[in-house]
Image (tube, grey):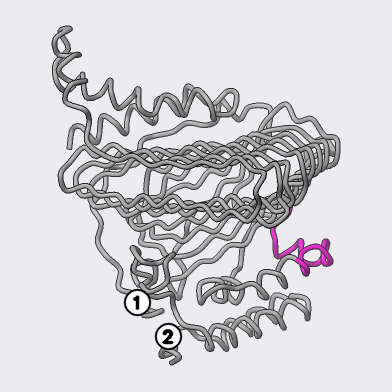
């Protein structure tokens, strides 16, 4: 049964597309996406990927949503500017810019004309593989996004930083689509900086990002998510990695009311390596879900994932991770682990690591561990003269320090360590 329609004005959306002189193929794609939206339903709790998150919490009332009021610690101040020196920082909607002939950026709605063939293919693939109403809605309504290309063989001394900020809209929903292409044999650091909405206004929306890593490329990627307590968001990120490439990613999640993030890694070549380290630190009654997919298609590739969570008060988290080894993907090597510290009896986490292996010459393992701080550790530190609060603080810092040691891009450790310490102090204080 198809659910009742929304309060969004589809006619206005299509007229706006014409007024902006979007290419005919894009206007056609939007119409197809609207038709697909009407045929599809919202994801239900019977869908494994949505078992613990009610889709209505991610939608404004104009789309049939049931927003919730969330109390959350203020997002710690994070000053990235010193670490971004010598690079390029781009805000959503900024005019086109180039950096030394190595990096080209333009807003996505300008790039659909200048780079029609590649973006037409990308968006048509997205429409063909739309999994639910969220995908269809994003394709029909997106009005902003990044289009970034790094030229083959470019070595970048400074980071490429994309600043994404949720914004209130007339209909209550904002969608972004972004495409980043890291050329073959290029090297550098990519930063995705997700900021809170201005003035704490309530926002809802989805962000869709594809990162293509060319053959022989070597990149560090930093995701910093610091939504405000009035921001609810669905994020869908996909990495596609070519031959002999190296990608090391670190993600820190601090904010948001209700946030669901899906990260897919697809090896499109052989002999490549991918490393993902991440942390989420939740307080109040924040809700956060992270779904990861390590998709080994051809074989001979290595993926390594470690995600840790710290939850206080009534924080709720879900981690769902799948390692998938396709038939013939021999010599694949994959690891996945999720560990959580629960600082309150009211905090809760669902940790669901999974394996799906269809090849016999592979090395795969996964693990999960969640629980409170070991009282023996607290006792030991107290016996050495530390007050209980300081002992707990030291244990939590040590718990997340491993991630900083392994996954943080050069030049960013100090600023991220400061943000983590500030958030730990908040969680202990409340």
In percent of width and height, residue 265 lies at: 62, 50
- In the image, is residue 86 above or below residue 107? above
Between 12 and 261, which is closer to the camera in this rendering? Answer: 261
Q: Is residue 111 magenta?
A: yes
User: What residue sits 57% from the left and 85% below the top?
Assistant: 12
- Magenta highlight range: 105-121
The residues tagged by marks 1 and 2 sit, at their Cα atoms, a distance apart of 9 Å
Q: Earlier in the sequence, mark 1 or mark 2?
A: 2
Between 378 and 228, which is closer to the camera in this rendering? Answer: 378
User: What residue sits 59% from the left and 49% below the top?
Assistant: 294
User: What residue sits 82% from the left and 66% below the top?
Assistant: 116
Q: Is residue 347 left or right of residue 231?
A: left
Furthest toward the front, the residue is: 360
In percent of width and height, residue 22 lies at: 74, 75
Residue 61: assigned label: 1
Please name the predominant secondary structure of the magenta segment in the image. helix
- In the image, is residue 69 above or below residue 41? above
Total numbered labels placed on residues in the image: 2
Between 305 and 115, which is closer to the camera in this rendering? Answer: 305
Would you identify the image quadrant in which residue 324 lies?
Answer: bottom right
In percent of width and height, residue 286 lies at: 29, 52
The 10 Å Cα crowd at callout 1, few under 14, some 14 to 19, many 20 or more, is some
In percent of width and height, residue 51 lies at: 36, 66
User: In which quadrant will I find the N terminus?
Assistant: bottom left
The 10 Å Cα crowd at callout 2, few under 14, some 14 to 19, many 20 or more, is few
Q: Which residue is mark 2?
A: 7
Q: Is residue 399 left or right of residue 236?
A: left
Between 3 and 116, which is closer to the camera in this rendering? Answer: 3
Q: Are marks 1 and 2 in contact (CB under 8 Å)?
A: yes
Q: At numbered mark 2, what does the secondary structure look like: helix, strand or loop?
A: loop
- In the image, is residue 244 above or below residue 212? above
């Amino acid at each position: 049964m198809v659910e009742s329609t929304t309060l969004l004005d589809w006619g206005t959306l299509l007229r706006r597309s014409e007024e902006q002189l979007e290419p005919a193929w894009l206007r056609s794609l939007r119409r197809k996406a609207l038709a697909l939206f009407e045929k599809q339903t919202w994801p239900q709790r019977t869908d494994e990927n949505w078992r613990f998150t009610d889709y209505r919490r991610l939608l404004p009332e104009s789309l049939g949503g049931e927003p919730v009021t969330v109390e959350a610690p203020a997002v710690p101040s994070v000053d990235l500017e010193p670490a971004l020196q010598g690079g390029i920082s781009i805000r959503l909607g900024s005019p086109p810019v180039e950096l030394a002939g190595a990096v080209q950026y333009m807003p996505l709605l300008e790039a659909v004309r200048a780079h029609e063939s590649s973006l037409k293919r990308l968006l048509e693939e997205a429409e063909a593989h739309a999994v639910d109403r969220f995908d269809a809605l994003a394709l029909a309504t997106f009005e902003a996004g990044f289009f970034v290309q790094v030229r083959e063989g470019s070595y970048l001394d400074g980071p490429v930083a994309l600043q994404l900020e949720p914004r209130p809209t007339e209909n209550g929903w904002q969608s972004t689509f972004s495409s980043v292409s890291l050329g073959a044999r290029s090297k550098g650091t990519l930063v995705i900086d997700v900021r809170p909405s201005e003035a704490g206004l309530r926002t809802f929306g989805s962000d869709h990002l594809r990162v293509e890593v060319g053959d022989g490329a070597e990149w560090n990627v930093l995701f910093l998510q610091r939504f405000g307590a009035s921001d609810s968001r669905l994020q869908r990120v996909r990495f596609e990695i070519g031959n002999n490439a190296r990608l090391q990613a670190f993600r820190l999640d601090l904010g948001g009311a209700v946030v669901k993030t899906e990260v897919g890694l697809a090896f499109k070549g052989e002999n490549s390596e991918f490393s993902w380290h991440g942390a989420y630190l939740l307080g109040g009654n924040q809700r956060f879900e992270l779904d990861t997919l390590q998709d080994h298609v051809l074989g001979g590739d290595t993926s390594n994932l470690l995600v840790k969570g710290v939850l206080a008060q009534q924080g709720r988290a879900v981690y769902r991770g799948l390692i998938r080894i396709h038939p013939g993907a021999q010599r694949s090597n994959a690891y996945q682990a999720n560990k959580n510290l629960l600082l309150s009896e009211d905090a809760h986490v669902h940790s669901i690591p999974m394996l799906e292996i269809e090849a016999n010459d592979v090395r795969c393992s996964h693990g999960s561990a969640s629980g409170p701080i070991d009282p023996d550790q607290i006792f030991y530190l107290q016996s050495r003269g530390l007050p209980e609060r300081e002992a707990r603080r030291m244990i939590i810092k040590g718990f997340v320090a491993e991630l900083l040691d392994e996954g943080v891009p050069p030049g960013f450790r100090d600023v991220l360590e400061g943000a983590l310490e500030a958030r730990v102090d908040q969680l202990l204080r409340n």
